[in-house]
Image (cartoon, rainbow, N blue to C red):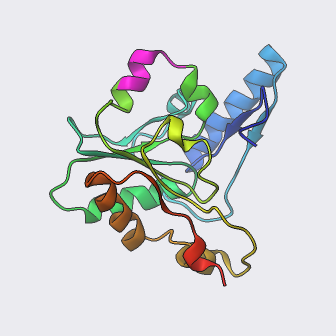
Amino acid sequence: LRMIPDLTVIRPADCNETAGAYKVAVEKSKLESMPTFLALTRQALPNLPNSSIENVEKGAYAVVECKSPELVLIGTGSEVSLCVDAAKEMDGKKIRVVSMPSWELFKAQPVSYREALLPKGVPTMSVEAAVTMGWGEFADAFVGINCFGASAPGGTCMEKFGFNISNVVACAEKCLKGEKGVLSDGSQGKH
């Protein structure tokens, strides 16, 4: 969907982000006559630190902030809370966790904001239960799903495709060591 021209895609990570997504969608429709797609989850998700309507309007923001991070984890939708949990497991590492509900809104921000949030020279890894295509604009390494065809209850699929704390931590460690590109593509879950 992100490849459709002039479509703003928003994947909110909690109820505050959902409220912000609705606000953006209504304003884009009313003021700009532009479409917005909201990709909502059916999962129960925790409210995240720093989530707000205003932060959704930026397209991306720090959920877990730290000065001079060693690694930035970028999540979107239900994967943001997974990134928060994975960062907690990485004792002694300075990890910034970023929620990026909308690529399009983030790209519209000033360069100074984008570079402060995703500093050059700091390894950055995206985590999204979707194809990894396109994430190279924002991240060095990716955890995603580049295959199709599995069917099971949601939690089972997420676990099998590698959307769990242990796999995200393992991939983050690889990213910290300089590995780039697709570090987990979901193929381990396909039978």
- Decide which of 55, 2 is in the foreground and name it: 2
Percent coordinates x, y for residue 176 in the rendering:
27, 53
Q: Main secondary structure of the magenta part?
A: helix
Going 55% across and 48% down the picture, which residue do you hit? 76
User: Which residue is at the front of the view, 12 or 164?
Assistant: 164
Residue at (74, 22) in percent of width and height: 27
Left or right position of 24 against 4: left
Q: Is residue 28 left or right of residue 186?
A: right
Residue 96 x %, y %: 31, 44
Q: Based on the displayed image, in which of its 4 quarters is residue 38 positioned?
A: top right
Give the residue at the far bottom of this rendering: 191
Q: Position of residue 110 (x, y in %)?
A: 48, 15
Decide: is 46 above or below 114. Answer: below
Q: Is residue 65 above or below residue 84?
A: above
Q: Residue at x 61, y 35 (%)?
A: 20
How many labels, in total? Answer: 0
Give the magenta part as a residue range: 109-115
Q: Which quarter of the rendering shows the C terminus?
A: bottom right
Q: Is residue 26 above or below residue 89?
A: above
Residue 32 to residue 130: above or below:
above
- Quadrant in the picture for residue 18: top right
Asked if the stretch drawn in magenta spans residue 110, the answer is yes
Give the x, y percent position of residue 16. 56, 43
Residue at the limit of the structure toward the left, as seen here:
92
> Is 190 contained in the magenta span?
no
Instruction: State the image quarter where residue 170 is shown.
Output: bottom left
* Quadrant that contains the N terminus: top right
